[in-house]
Amino acid sequence: MNFPSSTLLIQSILAGIFTGALYGLLGLGLSLSWGMLRQINLAHFALAFLGAYLTYQFSTYGGIDPLLTLLMIIPVFFVVGMAVHWVITRFRMTPFNSLLVTFGLTIIIEAMLQWIWTADYRRLESTYAEHKLQIGTVYLPLPELITLGLSLSISLIIWQVLRRSDIGKAIRAAAEDGPIAAAFGINQQALGLLLSGLNASLAGIAGVCIALGYTLAPSQIYSWIGVVFACVMLGGLGRPMGPIIAGCIIGISEAVTMAVVSPSWAPLVSFSLLIIVLLVRPERIQA
């Protein structure tokens, strides 16, 4: 075991926060889908990487600023999310069946990514990657700061909407007791379409953040599933602030473990946290 310097330790903690913010942003849409709609949407990860590849394509060959690609990605993904929700509800799929169907959709999207962009690694070269904010001996890369800002702001906005707005209260009521909510005139189908479109848009936003900071390959879709599911379950289903808080905890634990012990120990620490929480407080996985 090597004890790092204070500078390396602080830099590792910050890196863990930045990574955890991306985990939380990826997990936010999955948490809302699972907790509010009772749909386990594995295609959420594939949509995120599709958004990352579209950002790469538009920026590299179209000369569009990566953040401006959100203006195209968000509305398109919103429609895709509504379409997936319509199919799932049209055939009255159970949560387990929705898991299987969206897993198949994930494989289709992965094959499409390999067909269009091949299995080679791709890297978005943007002006954002060249800028770093320095505070003393610690560096804060701009792409990671953008990801953290987007994750926090989006999570806070959705949390406030669900708590204080009429539409947010209607969504929570429908998730708690659908028949009673319908008896009071709440249109569950419309709310489900709206929420599913929002969740897909969140996947697109996460994809832009992935493109800004990570090398892309279609097979990497599956490398994110385990840790993001851990964030969702640790944060609690249907809780907008839960995934980002849990993501930062897992991200910091992984980063510190890599700095102090070895990178190979990082998954062990993060999933040990999940097991401990599920043993002590199993209600955390309930919406």
Image (cartoon, rainbow, N blue to C red):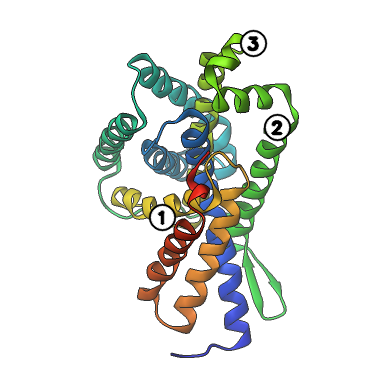
Marks 1/2: CA distance? 36 Å
Marks 3/1 in contact by CB < 8 Å: the verdict is no
Left or right: where 67 falls relative to 111: right
Q: Image quadrant of residue 108?
A: top left
Label 3 SS: loop
Give me the residue at 50% from left, 42% from top: 286
The tag on residue 184 is 3
User: Quick one: label 3 or label 1, which is nearer the N terminus?
Assistant: 1
Residue 126, given in percent of the width and then of the height, sits at: 53, 53
Marks 3/1: CA distance? 51 Å
Residue 61, given in percent of the width and then of the height, sits at: 43, 41
**Is residue 183 at least partly visible in the picture?**
yes
Residue 37, given in percent of the width and then of the height, sits at: 48, 28
- Depth check, mark 3 against mark 2: the one in front is 3
**Is residue 126 at least partly visible in the picture?**
no
Q: Residues within 10 Å of mark 2 (few under 14, many from 20)?
A: some
Name the quarter where the N terminus is drawn.
bottom left
Front one among 7 and 56:
7
Give me the residue at 53% from left, 19% from top: 178
Residue 72, given in percent of the width and then of the height, sits at: 53, 30
Three-letter code, disc 1: Arg
Label 2 SS: helix
Find disc 2 in the rendering and name its residue.
161
Residue 152 higher or lower than 142, as above or below: above
Residue 13 higher or lower than 87, as above or below: below
Give me the residue at 63% from left, 86% from top: 6
Find disc 1 in the rendering and name its residue.
123
Q: Residues within 10 Å of mark 1 (few under 14, many from 20)?
A: some
Marks 3/2: CA distance? 20 Å
Three-letter code, disc 3: Phe
Front one among 15 and 183:
183
Q: Residues within 10 Å of mark 3 (few under 14, many from 20)?
A: few
